[in-house]
Amino acid sequence: MAGWLCARLGLRSGNAAEWVRVAHALESLPECGRAYAGGRLAWDQVRPLTEFAAPEREAEQAADAVGCSAAFLEAVARRVRRVSRAEAERQERQRSPPTGR
């Protein structure tokens, strides 16, 4: 799909991939999707929101995001990415035996 968007709309591959990622995320976040479709959330708000919204809390998160700036939502998404990366590294260390010399 991202390749088609690039060819059809002239998007950069990174932008096209992000459009596809957000579209897939919105499939499991219907309230976020409705807020975006209804104009209550802008692209710059919904994009980072899809990085951290949880399906079980997304109605509340979508409603809260309406009053938030895009910069704030991006900061939350960055924080979540850092925590996710740190957690993945911790889990990898637990799975991998220490290497001895």
Image (cartoon, rainbow, N blue to C red):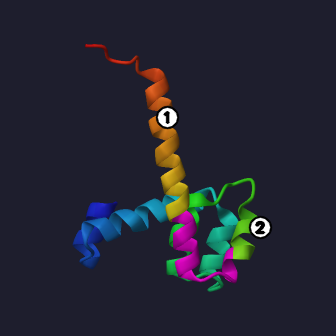
Residue at position x 46%, y 22% from top? 95
Q: Quadrant of residue 38?
A: bottom right
Q: Position of residue 50 (x, y in %)?
A: 56, 63
Query: Is residue 68 inside the magenta stretch?
Result: yes
Looking at the picture, which amino acid does disc 2 mark? Glu
SS at badge 1: helix
Residue holding disc 2 = 60
Q: Is residue 10 above or below residue 89?
A: below
Residue 46 is drawn in which quadrant?
A: bottom right
Q: Position of residue 81 (x, y in %)?
A: 49, 55
Helix, strand or loop: magenta stretch:
helix
Residues rendered magenta in the picture: 65-77
How many discs appear? 2
- Is residue 39 found left or right of 94 in the rendered image? right
Q: Which numbered tag is attached to residue 90?
A: 1
Q: Quadrant of the N terminus?
A: bottom left
Q: CA separation, marks 1 and 2?
A: 30 Å
Q: Is residue 85 magenta?
A: no
Residue 90 placement, left or right of 12? right
Pick the quarter of the image with the C terminus: top left
In the picture as drawn, the residue positioned furthest to the bottom comes out as: 39
77 vs 101, nearest the viewer: 101
Q: Residue at x 68, y 81 (%)?
A: 66
